[in-house]
Image (cartoon, rainbow, N blue to C red):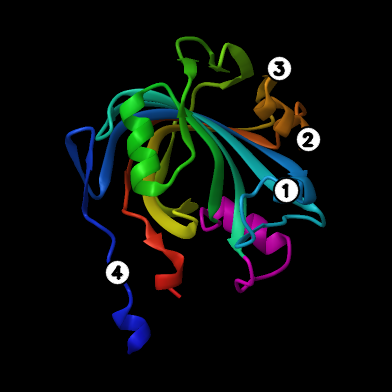
Amino acid sequence: MEAAASRVDPPQSYLIQGRTISMPCIVRDACSATATWLVSSYAAQKLLPGPELEIAEVAPGRGLLSIACIDYRDNDLGDYNEVSIAFFVRERGARRGIPYAGTAFEMMRGHLPTHIIHLPVNQSFGCEAGRTIWGFPKTVDEIEFDTTGERALCTWNRDGHNVLRVSMPIGGARSFPEQTLCTYSYIDGELHKTEFASSADQLGIQLGGADIELGADPIADELRSLGLPKRALMSMWLGKMQGRFDAPKRCSDTT
């Protein structure tokens, strides 16, 4: 009873730069290009900010890194571009299924959580909202995301230096049914969990498919420590995506 009484429901609205953002935060129209790489779980673990999470291994000593480039065209937080660099993770000590194969199956079904280590955007309101509401590691940088050709081309620069350039194929005719996903973040030093739902049309998936170049920047060096640039496992294009983000919940209140 005492544990239940100590739980605090997350706020259902937030005041950001004089604007009220209500939960859930709705994404009405976006497109994204995402690539996934197999990386050293040991090297990836060193990039996590705390001991509460561990890299979910899909093979001995191997975890998964994703880089997603997103154009939010109609979103409660505005119209902006974003780059997400994330690992697939578990809470340390969480129950596991079949080693390795079970982790890969969870990832393919959208049941494996992520933790984002970098999340630059090119708009200050989206940056402040992401940091304040969800504890996401957002920054305001230069992000160009060109989707006018046969390949989506994303260029991320910060502080006058290039971090990366990545391109992936555009096109697909399948639909992506709504899935409820989960990502972890830290707010005031405490681990939180955010659930979000996503669906899409114009889905295309390819083995490999991504070309990536790394620039002269400390974040690019982090990616080099993971073995990039190298061939991606797969790439995915979502031409018309919708979604909604719930308010974050403190993990200690949900266990």
Q: Is residue 241 visible?
A: no
Give the labeled residue for mark 2: 225
Choose the circle earlier in sequence order: 1 or 2: 1
| Quarter of the picture holding the N terminus | bottom left
Which residue in the protein does label 3 denote?
216
Mark toward the start of the polypeptide (2 vs 4): 4
The reply to whether the magenta stretch includes residue 51 is no
* 64 with respect to 146 (left or right): right
At label 2, which amino acid type do we have?
Ser
Q: Answer above or below: position of 117 versus 108.
A: above
**In-front residue for pair 40/250:** 250
Q: CA distance from mark 4 to mark 3?
A: 44 Å
Amino acid identity at mark 4 = Val
The Cα atoms of the two marked residues, 1 and 2, are separated by 10 Å
Sequence-earlier tag: 4 or 3: 4
Question: Within 10 angstroms of label 2, few (less than 14), some, or many (20 or more) residues?
Answer: some
Does the rendering let one see residue 235? yes
Please name the residue that numbered disc 1 is placed on.
46
Name the one closer to the observer, 11 or 155.
Answer: 11
Look at the image and give the residue range highlighted in magenta. Answer: 92-112
Q: Residue at image x 64%, y 49%?
A: 48
Residue at image mark 4: 8
Crowding at dot 4, Cα within 10 Å, few <14 / some 14-19 / many 20+, comes out as few
Horizontally, is 14 left or right of 182 in the view? left
